[in-house]
Every structure is written in structure tokens, then in C-alpha cells.
Amino acid sequence: MKRSIVSALLIAALFIGCAAEGGREGEERMYRKITAAQAKERMEQNPYAVVLDVRTRQEYEAGHIAGAVLLPLETLGENPPEQLPDKDAEILVYCRTGNRSAKAANKLAALGYANVSDFGGIADWPYGTVKG
């Protein structure tokens, strides 16, 4: 009985761990998925963290997080972008709803950036934005 309970708990932990990382079976994700609240906390704790907006220029100008660096997803290629010279810097990525930020975070991780977090979309950001 104890053995089956332990086995069940281990299997549950495995599935919970996979779900927390958001990956599919056999897929290793090299960045973290965090909440807007966690991103805000990291911004406050690390003034050198790069807040990266991967939307279009028009979306950025309509409203963005103060201090965010604009790097549209479609401009991310096979080489590290010049806006991000430090591959060890903390990078907090967002877009409008979370789709592009996940793609950008994955691309950045594949380019060798070691500390990338995706906090989804500005649609879920309750802390205010700036225009321009």
C-alpha cells in the first residue's frame, strides 16, 4: 500500500513539474514562465533587469511598461540582438497576450541567453504603462 502511494506521488510530481515548465513531453524549455506580479518584483529587486517588449513599434508606442526595450519578435534572428549584449543579464519578456513573448523567450534561450523569463502579455499587467 505504501509503495503504491509513493509511486502515485512520484508520478504526480513528474506531471506537475512538466506542467509548471509548460513544456510538452520530451521538450525541454530553457526559459522560465512567471506571472506579472513576479516580474514586477524582479524589476524592483534588480534595477539592471532588461524588460523586453517584443510587440510592434505601433503597439509599443500606444502603451508599454516604463523602461521597456523594444525588440519586435520578427526582428529576432539567428544572431544575438545588439540591444542585448549581456547573455547573463536578467531578461523579462512580454508582448500583448503571451504568444509572442513565449516565442521570443524560446529564441533568446536558444541564442544562449541564460536568464530569460516570460511574463506573458501586457493585457495582464495591472501596474500601469506609458505612451510614446
Image (cartoon, helix red, strand yellow):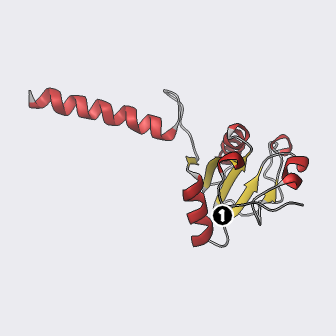
Badge 1 crowding class, 10 Å Cα cut-off, few under 14, some 14 to 19, many 20 or more, is: some
Q: Quadrant location of the C terminus?
A: bottom right
Residue at 30% in and 30% down: 11
Residue at 70% in and 37% down: 99
Query: Is 29 displayed left or right of 72 in the figure?
Result: left
Residue at 65% in and 48% down: 124
Label 1: which secondary element: loop
Query: Is 102 displayed left or right of 21 in the figure?
Result: right
Q: Nearer the viewer, residue 15 or 61?
A: 61
Q: Nearer the viewer, residue 104 or 120?
A: 120
Snapshot quadrant of residue 48: bottom right
Residue 120 x/y as whole percent: 65, 45
Residue 71 x/y as whole percent: 82, 52
Q: Nearer the viewer, residue 15 or 87?
A: 15
How many marks do you count on the picture? 1
Residue at 10% in and 31% down: 2
Query: Is 72 displayed left or right of 97 in the figure?
Result: right
Q: Amino acid at mark 1?
A: Ala
Q: Quadrant location of the N terminus?
A: top left
Residue 70 x/y as whole percent: 83, 55
Residue matched to label 1: 89
Snapshot quadrant of residue 38: bottom right
Relative vertical location of residue 25 with respect to residue 103 in this rendering, above or below: above
Relative vertical location of residue 82 with respect to residue 9 in this rendering, above or below: below
Q: Nearer the viewer, residue 108 or 19?
A: 19
Query: Is 68 displayed left or right of 87 in the figure?
Result: right
